[in-house]
Amino acid sequence: MLKSLIQLFAEMFLQSKSEWVASQGFPERRVQLSPELTQYVPPHDGYIGIYKNSANTGKFIDVYALNATNSIFARLCVGFTEGLTTYSEIIPVRKGCKVVIANATNSIQELWFSPAIGSDK
């Protein structure tokens, strides 16, 4: 009987927390960064976002995140033949990892960091 009660309580607790747990990885807000940055170290787990509009004539964007052993674990690399393309993307990043932003002059109009809900507390 006690074992059944404990199991029932645990199942009810986990069901009530599943939505909360699932939402912890989503972006919470947006912190604008300078589009001229070449490196960034995020203060929390989250996402790096970029936006290029069609007026920006840059030919490529390469953004990647390095782990503690300097191996790339997330990367966004895109080239534009005419340069006149609108583009937006995000990549996941970990707290304290080094993010490298390599892009042609005038490629990125907006650069931002969005901390994950569960890591920005």
Image: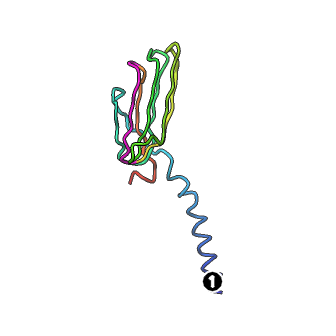
Q: Is residue 56 above or below residue 61?
A: above
Question: What residue would you read off at disc 1?
Answer: 3
Residue 40 placement (x, y as % from top left) = 34, 37
Q: Quadrant of residue 12?
A: bottom right
Are there few (<14), some (14-19), or many (20+) residues within 10 Å of tag 1?
few
Hey, which residue is sitting farthest bottom in the picture? 1
Give the quarter of the figure containing the C terminus.
Answer: bottom left
SS class of the residue under badge 1?
A: helix
Q: Report the residue at 45% width, 45% height from top.
A: 28
Residue 15 placement (x, y as % from top left) = 61, 65
Q: Quadrant of residue 8?
A: bottom right
Q: Is residue 104 magenta?
A: yes
Residue 13 placement (x, y as % from top left) = 57, 69
Residue 34 placement (x, y as % from top left) = 34, 29
Q: Is residue 67 magenta?
A: no
Give the quarter of the figure containing the N terminus.
Answer: bottom right
Amino acid type of the residue that numbered disc 1 sits on in the rendered structure: Lys
Image colouring: rainbow
Q: Residues in magenta?
A: 95-106
